[in-house]
Image: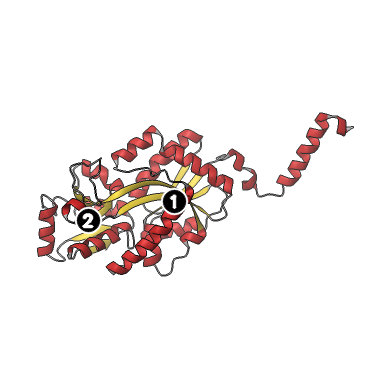
Amino acid sequence: MNDMNPWGQRRDFLKAMAAVTGSLPLWVQAQSSWPSKPVNMVVPFPAGGGTDAFARPMSAAFAKLTGKQLIIDNRGGAGGTLGAGIAAKATPDGYNYFMGAVHHTIAPSMYPKLDYDLERDLIPLIQVASVPQVLVVNPKKVQASDFKGFLEFVKKNPARLNYGSAGGGTSHHLAGELFKLQTKTFITHIPYRGAGPALQDLIAGNVDMMFDGLGSSAAHIKGGRIKALMVSGAKRNAAFPDVPCSAELGLPDYTVSTWYGVWAPKGTPADAQARAIEEIRRACQTDEAKAVWANQGAEFPNLTTTQFDGFIKKELTKWSQVVKASGAKLD
């Protein structure tokens, strides 16, 4: 009789579906309603750094849009590679993600024994921000009024100044080494466990200067705690129009920038990846996020996943060449 009874047919269909889905992992069954619970995002630097400066407003927008938390899990150390290793080994259930940066395309050329492979163990999803590098100094330690005066002092006093970085092999470190190479100067490198701790010491006067991503320095520049002498690249940054760019200061090839993106551990279900990309893109394009990005001199690149993947491959090649040319080493 069930063949003629629509309610019986529906019951039989639901039983059949239950038998099929019951054999699948729970996370595969749950993706259609993603996110159905809080989502974890490993940020491989301490709070207060550039990655954190974009991750937290993105998290706030994500929660507002989806009704679920995007939990920021700060795991600093080893130039961002410690957190990357943790993220690469996370359960690929659609609820574990990683917010990495340019540093992770430099790391393979600097760290000989990483416990993860960026291209093999992590899936690139979306690039969320791009900012130029900025040369900032403690105005009490470095009293030059402009870049020209600063450069004259550095050339006359080799090894007199030092610069802090987010760690060996980060863009802060490579930006410093490139600057030394192109200006024929010497400044001592002091690595930290993230840009946040380095900035704290710069503000306190324990280090003299930094080559920082504008995202983490912007508020401190505007607050007068540190002074910006130069932004990298061929044009001035709209958020800091009074700060000259490297091209106009005689360094046309000094084009270091910092960017941030989101990856998923290998094995993450494709539909969970798609939903994560969709919701992160929406979060980064809210009015609140746009205001934060603009205030920090950042852009949202709005690349497709394929474009982001291609960009990462180019960055890996580029930084490998930079490391060789500069002779940069871990301190």
Q: Which residue lies furthest to the right in this view?
A: 1
Query: x and y percent of residue 154 in the render?
Result: 13, 61
* Residue at position x 35%, y 62% in the image: 319
Q: Mark 2 points at which residue?
A: 252
Residue 54, picture quadrant: top left
Circle 1 crowding by C-alpha within 10 Å: few under 14, some 14–19, many from 20: some
Query: x and y percent of residue 69 in the render?
Result: 48, 39
* Residue at position x 24%, y 47% in the image: 235
Q: Do the residues labelled 1 and 2 touch (CB within 8 Å)?
A: no
Which is more N-terminal, label 2 or label 1? 2
Q: Does the image show residue 115?
A: yes
Q: From what the image shows, is residue 50 above or below residue 328?
A: above
SS state under label 2: loop
SS state under label 1: helix
Query: x and y percent of residue 97 in the render?
Result: 49, 50
Q: Nearer the viewer, residue 134 or 193?
A: 134
Asked whether, in this view, residue 204 is left or right of residue 287, the answer is: left
Q: Tell me the amino acid under the disc marked 2.
A: Pro
Q: Does the image show residue 48?
A: no
Q: Name the residue under label 1.
A: 308
Q: Nearer the viewer, residue 115 or 125?
A: 125
Query: x and y percent of residue 68 in the render?
Result: 51, 37
Q: Tell me the amino acid under the disc marked 1.
A: Phe
In the picture, the disc for residue 62 is none
